Every structure is written in C-alpha cells, then in structure tokens.
Amino acid sequence: DDNNKESRGALVVLEGLDRSGKSSQCSRLVSYLEGQGLSAELWRFPDRTTNVGQMISAYLSNASQLDDHTIHLLFSANRWEKRSLMETKLKSGITLIVDRYSYSGVAFSSAKGLDIEWCKAPEIGLLAPDLVAYLDISPDKAAKRGGYGDERYEKLEFQKKVAEHYKVLHDASWKVVDACQTIEDVEKQLQEIVLSCVTECQKGKALSSLWS
Ligand code: TMP
Ligand code: MG
C-alpha cells in the first residue's frame, strides 16, 4: 500500500468557443459515467451562484461595466472560491466534469489584448485538470449553429480572436475533438478519452497544480 497512490476522481475540463457543444456534452458525460457506476458531478465556470459569480453575470449581460483586468480577476476569484471544494470532491472519488476553466479565462482576456502571462498568473495554484477536451469548431460554423445569445462575448469577430488565443494554450493534457461531427460521434469520442482518464486517476495519478 502506497500513500502516494490514493484512488481519486478525475478533473476533466471541456473547453471551446461559445456554441461548440460543451454544455450538452458535459451533461451527457456525467450521465454516461453514472451509468458506468462511477460518481461524477457537472460543474461550470463561471459559477454564477456565488456573489462573485453574480458580478460576473451582470458584466456578461451588459448590466454592469468593468475594466478588463478587473473582470479577469473576478473570473479567477470565482475559481479560487471553489478550489478547496473541488479538491475535497476529487479526493472522495468524485469525477468532476467542468464546463470551462482557466483556459477560458486566459483565452478570452488575452483576446481582448491583455498580456498572456499576466492573465495566467492568478490561475497559478489552481488544480490542474487531468484532461482538457477542446471541442474544435471554426468560429464561422459555431456562429451558424444559431443561438448566440446577447451576452457580451457572443460575437463572431471576437470569437475569431478567442479561437486564436486558445491555440497557444494547448499542452500535453489537451485532446482536440472535432466538434463538427454528429453529437453522438463527439459523445463517443469523449466517453473513450474520459473513461481512460478516470481509470488513471483511480490508479492513483497525483493531483497537480496549474500551470503544469
Ligand atoms: P458561459 O457561456 O459558458 O456561461 O460563459 C460565459 C462567458 O464567459 C463565455 O463567453 C466565456 C467567458 N469566460 C471568460 O471570459 N473567462 C472565464 O474565466 C470563463 C470561465 C468564461
Ligand atoms: Mg455563453
């Protein structure tokens, strides 16, 4: 028995442009994992239920105006306020399927022109995902799916910039999934990569911190 090899849940993050299908795939993944007898929870950032989250939500709906640095730090604070609960859940064996995380934070803010290293700094020390699945779709195709809402960033020109800024964040923990396949094909591909990640974590893969 090895103390460094404790079984735990996996931290799985889905990233992608608005309308890439993240939210539906996240719910499908949670149902799938539960069907496999695994415990899993659906999380999302921003978490609009907290005080910080309500400030973010007001900003996104254009009900309030904030300096670009200020809103960036609020998004980050919204993850920090959930960090210890995430760790507790993971250590108790629950897999977290998270709809957006620090990569959204950095991609969206740096797309506005903020320095990328400055954007990454407040994320240092948050839990590093075991897997980042990037739902890849061109900004034009995403826009054609319809249903961009009225929120601040849901505009084609800005989404094009975000797509460019996501690209520089790809690292070894990323799996790029073609989000233009059918919902079912995306779902199948995600199930495979997530299940193997969950298995690694059950075997005791160590938790680490951003950016690693
Ligand atoms: P949502 O549509 O997934 O609720 O996210 C709201 C918007 O916030 C979306 O356009 C992406 C953006 N965002 C950031 O700018 N920074 C962040 O840290 C996060 C999590 C999201
Ligand atoms: Mg949205």
Image (cartoon, grey):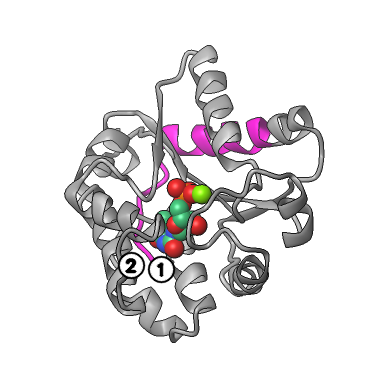
Q: Nearer the viewer, residue 2 or 103?
A: 103
**Drawn side of residue 58 relative to residue 100, left or right:** left
Which residue is label 2 attached to? 123
Answer above or below: position of 119 versus 55: below
Q: Is residue 61 visible?
A: yes
Answer above or below: position of 99 versus 25: below
Q: Residue at x 35, y 34 (%)?
A: 8
Q: Nearer the viewer, residue 202 or 77?
A: 77
In front: label 2 or label 1: 2
Residue 211, which numbered label? 1
Name which residue type carries label 1: Trp
* Residue 132 screen position, x and y as percent: 55, 51
Name which residue type carries label 2: Glu
Question: Is most of the magenta stretch helix, strand or loop?
Answer: helix
* Residue 17 screen position, x and y as percent: 61, 56
Q: Which residues are magenta?
A: 190-210
Residue extending farthest to the front is 63
Q: Is residue 100 visible?
A: no
Marks 2 and 1, Cα distance to the nearest angstrom?
A: 8 Å
Q: Nearer the viewer, residue 3 or 206?
A: 206
